Amino acid sequence: MSSRSYRSAFFLASVVCLLLGAALVFVLLRGHPLSSDTPLEDPVVARGLSGPEQPLSAAKTADASAEPDLSPIQLSPQRMQEIGVTTAVAAIRQLNDRVSVPGTVDIDERRISYVQTRFAGWIQNVFANATYQYVRKGERLFTIYSPDIVSSEQEYLLARQNQNAFSQDGHGADGHGADQHGTARQESDWLLHASEDRLHQFGIPDQEITNLQQSGKVQHDIAINSPVSGYITERNALSNAYVQPETKLYTIADLSTVWVYANVAQSDVGRLRPGNAGQVTVDSYPGRKFNGRVDQVLPQVDPATRTVRVRLIFPNPGIALKPGMYVNVDLAAPLGRQLVVPASAVLQAGARTIAFVDHGGGNLEPRTVETGPTLDDSIVILKGLKAGDRVVSSANFLLDSEVQVQASMGAARPPTPPASPGQGAASAPQLQLDFITVPSPPRKGTNALRVFVKGGDGKPVPGAQVTVAFFMPAMPAMGMAAEHAQATLSDKGNGTYEAPLELPSGGTWQVTVTVQRGGQIIATKQLTASATGGM
């Protein structure tokens, strides 16, 4: 075949392929027409099998609210006795809390004194020559020689001599001479007082001035006495040392009263006030207690330990509390009159704190409360209860389970179908349900369930659909999730229905027996079963 014939055949085959492709596209477009407003990717939305579609906002609200509403529950006296319900009365009491924290002893800064001279000089003899030596007020500490003091003493002695001279000459003067003599005597008195006042300003003790008056001689070594009684905590007075007025020679601390700094957590410091009582115990003195009071809550928080220093004042007889000593501090924190209930009456249920109020007759109301500090076996109620309310003080976990069960059953129970025209409510059959387990009581693992269904006339009811659901609510405080187990029972005839069921754990289960016929619920029964075998 020539090349021209090949080209013709290839062209004809190409045209045929194009026509077939166009025909295929046409068929596909007719079967699946495109719409300009149809998105390319349509997200898959899961919908329930029955019931109206839920708005998106309602769905979000339902997801955000994980906790069921608190609804009152009704228990029979027998049921309350089975789970061990006891009650207590909310009462107002005068409360005193105590905060126990570590602390350290420190010197009372208000009882610290310094010893310095008001003149320059050379120390001669040192009598208080040891740190932590105890000295009494007026006790001699050291002697010092000062040229300035010697000059002032000479001026003082000269002024006394002049005064004595004028006193002797004044007896024979009269007239104009007496006036001149009186003026000179006044000037002499002024000089004497000025020189004596200068010695006082230099801090010369009165005893030294008295010795100067009596001896009439200059005292080269001046004795310096202790201004207070206490312990020498710092000493710079050394023999032959030259000192200036700014030289701190001694630091003397009176330890008859000391400070104690207590390190209180910032969460507790709000309960403390100046004047509150405090007590200190020390391991060095077993059985001995020191009583004091809060002086000041210091306005600073330690960023490393998140504690606040609280300063207390303690008498210190016998210097038993020594600066730097570690002590145990017990602080009294009066709370005034507060509403309290037993601590066991409050239950932490998820994010809520609840208490069950007993209205009598088995009517229990779960109520959200706001709590304060816990004191011994009681807890302060800030909001949610009032004085005189009777609250459940035990078995709160089981009561919370009852609340969750009833809330879950109320949410899961389908609405009662409306009565057909001409059919009254009284036409619904009244059934009697008897439920047993083998073994009895049930256990963790495999159990046999058996339900007997009888009509109001006592005759067996066959041909029904019977289901038994076991439910144990979640207990967040114990870290336990909710558990479920369900079985559909087989009709064994003569109104008897049986089926095996595997229980995942022991404990108290809420059991619901449901009987249906024709897709409608004709009878239900709720009861409690305690399974053995542990959690």
Image (tube, rainbow, N blue to C red):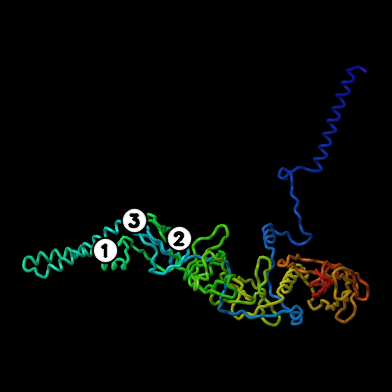
Which quadrant of the rendered structure holds the C terminus?
Answer: bottom right
Observer-nearest of 307 and 150: 150
Determine the image quadrant of residue 511. bottom right
The tag earlier along the polypeptide, 1 or 3, is: 3
First reached walking from the N terminus: tag 2 or tag 1? 1
Q: Secondary structure at mark 2?
A: strand
Mark positioned earlier in the residue sequence (3 or 2): 3
Q: Residue, x 74% and y 48% (percent of image)?
A: 42
Residue 120 - label: 3
Which residue bears the numbered disc 2? Answer: 234
**Foreground: 533 or 180?**
180
The image position of residue 181, as x and y in percent, is 11, 65
Q: Amino acid at mark 1?
A: Lys
The Cα atoms of the two marked residues, 1 and 3, are separated by 21 Å
* Residue found 43% across the figure and 58% down from its top: 236
Q: Secondary structure at mark 3?
A: loop
Residue 155 in picture, x, y percent from top left: 23, 60
Left or right: 429 in relation to 201: right
Query: In what quadrant of the picture does the N terminus appear?
Result: top right
Whether residue 13 sits left or right of residue 365 in the image: it is right
Mark 3 and mark 2: span between their CA atoms?
20 Å
Q: Tell me the kind of residue under disc 2.
A: Glu
- Residue 96's x, y, as percent? 56, 75
The answer to the question of whether label 3 and label 2 lie on touching residues, with beta carbons closer than 8 A, is no
Q: Quadrant of residue 129?
A: bottom left
Q: State whether residue 535 is above or below residue 86.
A: above
Element class at badge 1: loop
Q: Which residue is mark 1?
A: 217
